[in-house]
Amino acid sequence: MKITVQAKPESFLIKLEGRIVGAWAEEFRKAWQSLQQSLDSRELLLDLCDVIYIDEGGKQTLRQIYQSTGAVFVTNSPLTKYFAEEAMRDGAVKNEKENADAIPDWK
């Protein structure tokens, strides 16, 4: 798994890659907790385009992030869309962009 964080004055982008499982899911949770303090009122984008699997621990972290921030999920396939929908399942707001091209200024 790889986590890349990009910060701008108005938003943060967290790009996840690979398999978010076991100890890596725990590392993702820790990375989120350390970043959470810096978020302030900035929009949070979660790029799942290069994620190939997420275990229950990773899904729980995505749910917590979504519920506390209303993060926007960036997806590019039925699989990554499924991961985003699972994370948003318990939330009231649906925030999803169909692919990374929807956010060209991050490329």
Image (cartoon, rainbow, N blue to C red):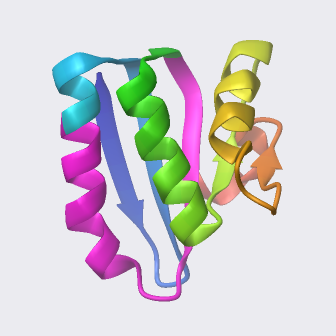
- Residue drawn at point x = 62 percent, y = 40 percent: 87
Q: Residue at x 27, y 46 (%)?
A: 29
Residue depicted at 76% across the width and 18% down the height: 77
Q: In front here: 20 or 11? A: 20
Residue furthest front as drawn = 90
Image height check: is 82 above or below 100?
Answer: above
Q: Position of residue 106 (x, y in %)?
A: 57, 54
The residue sitting at 47% across, 84% down in the picture is 9
> Is residue 45 at all visible to an observer of this figure?
yes
19 vs 48, left or right, is: left
Task: Decide if residue 36 is on the left or right side of residue 9.
Answer: left
Was residue 8 drawn as part of the magenta stretch in this picture?
A: no
Q: Nearer the viewer, residue 89 or 2?
A: 89
73 up-or-down from 19: above or below: below
Which quadrant: the N terminus? top left
Classify 20 as above or below 100: above
- Numbered marks: total: 0
**Residue 68: image location, x then y, percent:** 52, 69
Asked whether the viewer can see residue 107, the reply is: no
Across and down, in percent, residue 2 comes to 29, 28
Query: Residue 49 colored magenta?
Result: yes
Q: Whole-percent x and y of residue 19? A: 38, 14
Q: Residue furthest bottom?
A: 41
**What stretch of residues is rendered in magenta?**
27-51
